[in-house]
Image (spheres, rainbow, N blue to C red):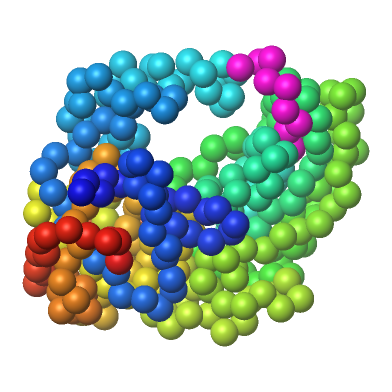
Amino acid sequence: MEWRCAGLGWPGGVPVLRWAGGRSSALVYGRVIGFRAVGERRCVGARGNPCPLRAVVPARATQARCPECARLDRAFSVAADGVPDDPRTYRVYLAWFGAGLVKVGITAEERGAVRLLEQGAVAFCWLGRGPLMAARRTEELLRAALGVPDRVPYARKRAVRGALPGWAERARELAELYRRAVVLEGWAEALERVEFEAVDHSAAFGWGEAVGGAAVGATDGGAAGAADGVVRQLVDGGVVAGRLVSAAGPDLYLAVADGRVLVVDTRVLVGWELAGVDAGAAAGGGVTVPVEAVRGAAGGSGSGSGGGGGGEQDGLF
């Protein structure tokens, strides 16, 4: 049975690894997980259709699509205004990733906060709700007027997670931007303003239990969100294994045998066939794929002992 990775998802506000064919594996904080890459990374296709060529894609690419499938997927993307007549209600939001690092964006109202979890937003607030194009026009207005971007690179998000201010500072920064946003002239008439409420994702990310908006009892393995290196590519036969400390957006934080906490960027897992490793290798925290430094943190190339597994799998972890 092939277990080809389809990425990290956040259904119901909890992280799961998804697989081609619709299966998923629950990711439980504190649990030891491990896998071995098999063969080559293949294109995942577009819009629910498989790639007709099963094309090989680069190991470091954050999107597991060949050029043709990528163009097809983009052509029907809301982000690219490929579906301007989408009848759904959309919400405009402010997403907070760290001190001074905030972006504006939109998401379908029916998805709730899932889009914010997928992006790794530590905290967020809603600004308004209405038709797609009204939300898009207001997003552009807010981006320019508030001086905030509509995209934040994941490298920057990772760099600030190891030194996050407390809940009061997060809420204060969001409240100030919200106050400036709602009084601006030029909002699309069809967009309804939403009352301010700051939402924190510390508990969902495994950094502690949210009590009155504040996260307490952060997980071990260093400061919440701190890491020593990042896995941004797999290789055939390469093993990744360790204890799952936390997750944020597409990133898994694993405590490995040598004492480091490594980030696994699950976007580069997509398209790979993954096989489970034996319990001993997983418990030993073997890592035999390239490891890069996290900007602003110590780290470098590393490897460890790992093992392989064979036969049928009932589940990967």
Does residue 112 appear left or right of residue 189 in this picture? left
Q: Quadrant of residue 105?
A: top right
Image height check: is 58 above or below 157?
A: above
Q: Residue 43 location, x and y as percent?
A: 26, 30
Q: Is residue 249 visible?
A: yes
Image height check: is 234 above or below 279?
A: above
Q: Please name whichever residue, 41 or 312, is drawn nearer the observer in this view of the structure.
A: 312
User: Is 29 contained in the magenta span?
Assistant: no
* Residue at left offset 27%, top offset 61%: 314
Q: Residue 226 location, x and y as percent?
A: 42, 70
Q: Residue 245 location, x and y as percent?
A: 41, 73
Image height check: is 219 above or below 1?
A: below
Q: Is residue 300 visible?
A: no
Does residue 93 appear left or right of residue 243 in this picture? right
The quarter of the image holding the C terminus is: bottom left
* Residue at left offset 37%, top offset 71%: 244
Q: Residue 262 location, x and y as percent?
A: 31, 66
Q: Please name whichever residue, 126 or 179, is drawn nearer the observer in this view of the structure.
A: 126
Q: Please name whichever residue, 283 or 48, is drawn nearer the observer in this view of the structure.
A: 48
Does residue 304 appear left or right of residue 132 in this picture? left
* Residue at left offset 46%, top offset 20%: 74
> Which segment did they paint magenta?
83-92
